[in-house]
Image: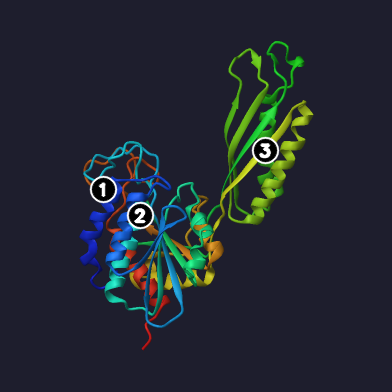
Amino acid sequence: MLLAEGILDLQAEIQAIRRDIHAHPELRFEEHRTARMVAEKLTGWGYEVTTGIGGTGLVGRLRQGTSQRAIGLRADMDALPVLEQNTFGHRSVHAGKMHACGHDGHTAMLLAAAKYLSRHRDFDGTLNLIFQPGEEGGAGARKMIEDGLFSRFPCDAVFGAHNWPGMKAGQFGVTAGPMMGSSNEFEITLTGRGAHAALPHNGADPVLTATHLVQALQSIITRNKKPIDAAVLSVTEIHAGDATNIIPESAIIRGTVRTFSIEVLDLIETRMKAIVEQLPPAFGVTGRMEFLRNYPPTINDPQQTEFAVSVMRDIVGDDNVVYPIEPTMGAEDFAFMLLERPGCYIFIGNGDGSHRDAGHGMGPCMLHNPSYDFNDELIPIGATLWTRVVQRFLPKQG
């Protein structure tokens, strides 16, 4: 592994920052302490810092040389509403809040790169470090964009990364095209006519209708979309009634839809609407659907992916770059940035959990798990990735 020269000298300092952030988690759009600390560090290292972008987001800008090219590197800052089970020294001091997804580590890796690049300044162009709020369900990337992120801080390309448990530390994973799925929710309300369970002919049963509707929705996946187009439609909730001898008046069905393309998503939503409107009347019931599009699919630009892969291979070697990696239907709001600018989203191996100190919980070290902890061994690896991406994207003249 070819780490950036001197990057290990920053390990202890940045690890302490990471663990401080872990101990003081803040939920989406509440990242005031984290953003303030990041801003103070960047300012001290010579960056122009702009705060309050999309709420609690901020950008640190560093200009060097005469090139007009610019690059954006993004890290997320928010935590999750999870009660931490770990008991080590840097566990959360806020009950019910936890960095269970490693955003503390993402912030730390980008800070390590920020300090290294401010010292060496071995690039020519503009570096925009984007520290984003509200990734966990808040669409913080979209809010930053709506607040003028790319008009105020132009970028020719943007890059982001996420730690990936189960992949060995020291490995990277990436693919061109769809990397992660879109995230969407639906709620279907069926309204019938209540009746005594012994006299069902007097009612219009929304529960019976719901059972048929759930089956019909799966026909979209098996009979409407092309078999080669990946998609998942999952009904995860059915709520109806509160007594065994009463046919209720209404039923509610909720669930999620995930796809790798907007075209397939459009098809699924259209067919769902038709089924919800047309099937229930056959049972004397009416149907209404609300469909919420949360995050679009995360789609990596092929050219920028090839560029990132070449950088990763120079750092860890061909054998430690999983390319192409199998995409996941998990969602990521960096997708909004990739809709605006070409770029690439990368997985960084977080290991199998053996890095955790004594005092971790009984669960696995997986994302969104109360026993999770970011692997601090990734700090110099991730920082090297970001410094090499900047140096190669904004090469120093002469």
Q: Residue at x 71, y 45 (%)?
A: 271
Mark 3 residue element: strand
Q: Is residue 298 left or right of residue 246?
A: left
Q: Which of the two labelled residues, at mark 3 and mark 2, occupies the earlier sequence position?
A: 2
On the rendered image, what quadrant is the N terminus found in?
Answer: bottom left
Q: Quadrant of the C terminus?
A: bottom left
Q: Which of marks 2 and 1 is in front?
A: 2
The answer for how far apart the CA atoms under marks 3 and 2 are is 39 Å
> What residue is pinned by disc 3?
289
| Residue at 29%, 60% in the rendered image | 40
| Mark 1 / mark 3, whichever is N-terminal | 3
**Is residue 197 shown left or right of residue 156?**
right
Q: Mark 1 is on which residue type?
A: Arg
Q: How crowded is mark 2: few (under 14 residues within 10 Å), some or many (20 or more)?
A: many
User: How many residues crowd around disc 1 within 10 Å: few (fewer than 14), some, or many (20 or more)?
Assistant: some
Q: Which of 117 and 202 is in front in this view?
A: 117
Q: Which of marks 2 and 1 is nearer the N terminus?
A: 2
Kindly identify which residue carries mark 2: 35
Q: Looking at the picture, how far across and down is residue 65, in whole percent? A: 37, 82
User: For the residues carrying marks 1 and 3, which lies nearer the camera in this image?
Assistant: 3
Residue 125 percent location from the top left of the image: 41, 78
Q: Which amino acid does label 3 sit on?
A: Met
Residue 2 visible in the snapshot: no
Q: How is the image coloured?
A: rainbow
Within 10 Å of the Cα at label 3, are there few (<14), some (14-19), or many (20+) other Cα atoms?
Answer: many
Inter-mark Cα distance, 2 to 1 = 26 Å
Which element carries disc 1, helix, strand or loop?
loop
Vertical comparison of 72 with 276: above or below: below
- Looking at the image, residue 304 lies above or below residue 246: below
Front-most of residues 344 and 42: 42
Please report the residue visible at 32 percent of the width from the left and 55 percent of the height from the top.
Answer: 36
Q: Name the residue under label 1.
A: 356
